[in-house]
Image (cartoon, helix red, strand yellow):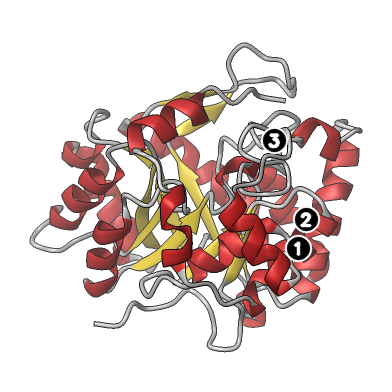
Amino acid sequence: MPSPSLLSAHAPRLGLGLAALGRPGYINLGHDRDLPNKSMDAMRDHAWAVMDAAWNAGVRYFDAARSYGLAEEFLGSWLRERGHGADAGVAVGSKWGYTYVAGWRADADTHEVKSHDLETLDRQWPETLATLGRAPEAYLIHSATLETGVLENTDVLAQLAELAASGVRVGLSTSGPRQQGTIRRALDVRVDGVSPFSVVQATWNVLESSAGTALADAHAAGWTIVVKEGVANGRLTAHGLSGTGDVPPALAAIAREQDVTPDAVALAAALGQPWADIVLSGATTQPQLAENLAALRVRVDASELQLLKTAPDVYWRERSGLPWN
């Protein structure tokens, strides 16, 4: 069964994620240098400029979350100011389950708090409606895992089923070394015999590809697949794996051959997966976005990057060690 798309047939499959644009601190390599002025007004103007550039390049999918600082507010106000409604072909995804608690500080001890209970869902859904000024096309459990029990919480699932029945595309995002198990468990969820889910957003990149087979199964079941962290929070860019420019030789070689930056190759590898419907750019600046968009013209044989694959536990341990900056 083909996966129903959130995009028109003419829109590029690259979307824009706002995780790095909506808050002053994030774990992307170089984030601090990318945003020298972290006042709310300056960051709003900056986010709008990046979204304008994305829109002008044809991007029509924008991804936010309640925990991305003011990302929903920036996105909602931009959509209203620019007149970009659903009739313009724009699609919005957002997520519930984390609460932003950093108080607009990049050096906060805690940036977000996770809670997958009904109280959080009941609070955050109206907040999302108010800040976006509309219902998102896709509404996801933020970083669902087997450990939180959200996929067994009958009250939460019933509420999500009601949203799905109203026309919202309900789903989940996944993180961590057990993404594959979480996706397979979600595929089995039923409320009154019907699955409430039709979208999954998962981490997939050439370093961490363990969710691939489960994503293929979800796609075959008719779900829309959104890929996040295609450049591994900056580790598959010119910053290199450790932030010192140590770009993997295989990635660098393809980039040189096709006259693009390493991030374009990494994103092209994700776009090349037959189950991938939308791949998110996490660009923080307009030049980064332009480099990411080059992925749309790059052709990559993923087997050439197979040696970059790491064990999921190793990948997620290294990711958890990235500093908020």
Identify the residue at image location x=65%, y=51%. Answer: 282
Identify the residue at image location x=32%, y=62%. Answer: 164
Question: Would residue 117 appear left or right of 120 to someone viewing this image?
Answer: left
Could you say which is closer to the camera, residue 175 or residue 96?
175
Query: Mark 3 packing: few (<14 Cα in 10 Å), some, or many (20+)?
Result: many
Query: Mark 1 packing: few (<14 Cα in 10 Å), some, or many (20+)?
Result: some
Distance, label 3 to label 2, CA atoms, is 12 Å
* CB within 8 Å, label 1 to label 2: yes
Question: Which residue is under mark 2?
Answer: 288
In the displayed structure, 246 sits above or below 59; it is above
* Amino acid type for the residue under numbered disc 1: Glu
Choose the circle earlier in sequence order: 3 or 1.
3
Distance, label 1 to label 2, CA atoms, is 5 Å
Question: Which residue is under mark 1?
Answer: 291
Q: Secondary structure at mark 3?
A: loop
* Amino acid type for the residue under numbered disc 3: Leu
Q: In which quarter of the view is residue 314 placed? A: top left
Q: Which mark is residue 29?
A: 3
Where residue 154 appears, as percent x and y from the top left, is 16, 40
Where residue 167 appears, as percent x and y from the top left, is 38, 69
Choose the circle earlier in sequence order: 3 or 2.
3
Q: Which mark is residue 168?
A: none
